Amino acid sequence: MKSRFVRLAETGRRAVSFRVDGEVVAGLEGDTLLVAMLCNNDHVRHSEFGPEVRSGFCLMGACQDCWVWTTDGERLRACTTTVDADLDIVTRQPEVSWSNLV
Amino acid sequence: MVQPRVIVVGAGPAGVRCAETLVAAGIRPMIVDEGRRDGGQIYRRQPDQFSRPYSKLYGTEAARAKSLHDSFEALRAKVDYWPETLAWNISGGKLYTARDGLASDHAYDALILCPGATDRLMPVKGWQFAGTYSLGASQIALKAQACAIGGNVVFMGSGPLLYLVANQYVQAGAKVAAVLDTSPFSKRLRALPKLLARPDVLRKGATLVKSLKKSGVRIVSGIEPVEIHGHDQLGVEGVSYRDSCGTVQRIACDAVALGYHLRPETQLADLAGCAFTFDASTHQWLPQLDAMGRSSVKTVYLAGDGVRVLGADGAEAAGALAALAVLKDLGRPVDAARVDALKRERAKMDRFRAGLADAFPWPAQHAARLSDDTIVCRCEGISVGELRRVTLEEGAREANRAKAFSRVGMGRCQGRYCGHAAAEVIAAAAGVPLDKVGRLRGQAPVKPFAISTIPVSVTTPEPTEVAEGK
């Protein structure tokens, strides 16, 4: 997998491991989830309306193009979420996503 | 004296200067901020684990950024700060918020909206490919996360931010493939008299372009974007544009930062019932505003780039001015000399804004020429051809009707990134003036939040007696 973003500085931070589609990947403390994912891969989700993959667009919480999900079904906006070792992310929307209403 | 309930939405340059002016008059405002910390987007802070100095983060604006952050620190104990809180509706004199899965509402005596701006976008064929970002996004990646959006970046669109961010990328060690500006150089020359309203900013701009050229970055003016080339699974691979001689040129890249200046986030003003007027010079509907920041609705005030894009310095002046309008309307004493000085400052910024609109115009004519297979709505993959079809075959010549028929503007971004271009496409297809197409109505919630969000009643802090000036 090819990373999309390129780190230019601030690389001395501690590593944080988390999971994306079952694979363990590493980000750095203080990364947004979007940055941590895109420093490991070239996309964060699959479009539901077209054939293409997506990698976010506005990075300021306005476009909602960077939604990802946890294995529990919770939806996260990757650009405004800080990466965390507990995160277990899936890049396709799971069937049930209203976990706390069940 | 019983405290009036004053709410400020936004903690960027306008929101912070607004709150500061209110606090100086003895009022304790509630500040609702979608950000994790104050600063807004322009003076956005990097996370705690990062260590770059202000000079590196904010360049020539380092002192202003530091001053704004310091001012906010000094206010912290004197305001009710709600970070990471979405203001999602205004109805019946109440502001509705959502924070951490909990929704609440807040009555107010005065509401000052300083929600800032987002990038103004014109679709281009292929802009749905991974690796296409808004220009603002490319700057946030660098400023807040020390990352480039790709290994070889094209900056395309128009406006001063195009050159600013490209230069920041070069300085940070990123590779910039080209800067492609739709504005012809002649327009910038003609706009000079208005731009001279802020000679210091004009000088900074000239230095930027010089620095970019010195680094060997290809800068092309007067282009028309043709296509972002790419692959469904791999994303962006290049950009094609038509140069001013009409020849199509292609550049290889793995990322595109796309933007045509900024558009105000006016949804909350719309929900509050504020009247809008059509601004012919920038081809958009903007909330009506008096010289101090009063909207058409009593108790609702507007400031910063969320109502008129004047830039950060203009937003600071507008924020303070709106607070003074609130104080005046509450019957508090207001320093008339300060009001006059701020009004003059704001007028200067507005003249410069008009100059920028002339120098880097929104290329409306490009929307009319977009190919039918270009995606106009990135959220739901709806084509320009489909929008033209509902306009011509179903008679949807008004923005909201076309939205209902085509779903353009109904997706996740709620029309933020397609709305302006969609209106141009409809106007050109139907052969009607742009203002007759109207504008997409703001809808609550202005951003999506989970249906599992739980309504709670918030105990507003008891009104407290505060001596003025403390």
Image: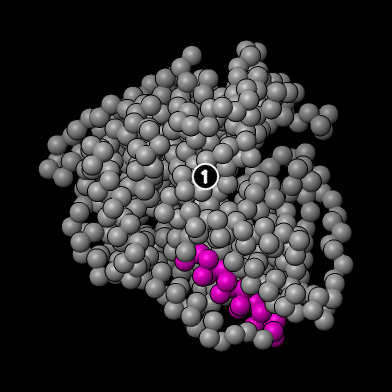
Question: What amino acid is found at the position of numbered circle 1 in the picture?
Answer: Pro
Residue in front for this viewpoint, B290 or B140: B140
Find residue B395 and report its horizontal and vertical position in percent.
Answer: 41, 51
Split into 4 quadrants, where in the image is the C terminus of chain B? bottom right
List the residue tagged with mark 1. B53
Q: Position of residue B95 (x, y in %)?
A: 72, 61
Give B207 or B462, whichever is nearer the viewer.
Answer: B207
- Looking at the image, which residue sits at the far left? B245
Magenta span: chief secondary structure: helix
Up-down relation of residue B453 to residue A78 (above or below): below
- The N terminus of chain B: image quadrant: bottom right
Q: Is residue B350 visible?
A: yes
Is residue B377 among the parts visible in the rendering? no
Task: Look at the image and say whether residue B146 sits in the magenta stretch.
Answer: no
Q: Left or right: B227 with respect to B328? A: left
Q: Residue at x 84, y 76 (%)?
A: B465
Decide whether residue B329 is among the magenta residues: yes
Which residue shows up at 45% across the image and 55% down it? Answer: B61
Picture mark count:
1
Task: Specify start and end residues of the magenta stretch as a single range.
Answer: B314-332
**Residue at the location (44% across, 39% down)?**
B138
| Up-down relation of residue B157 to residue B95 (above or below) | above
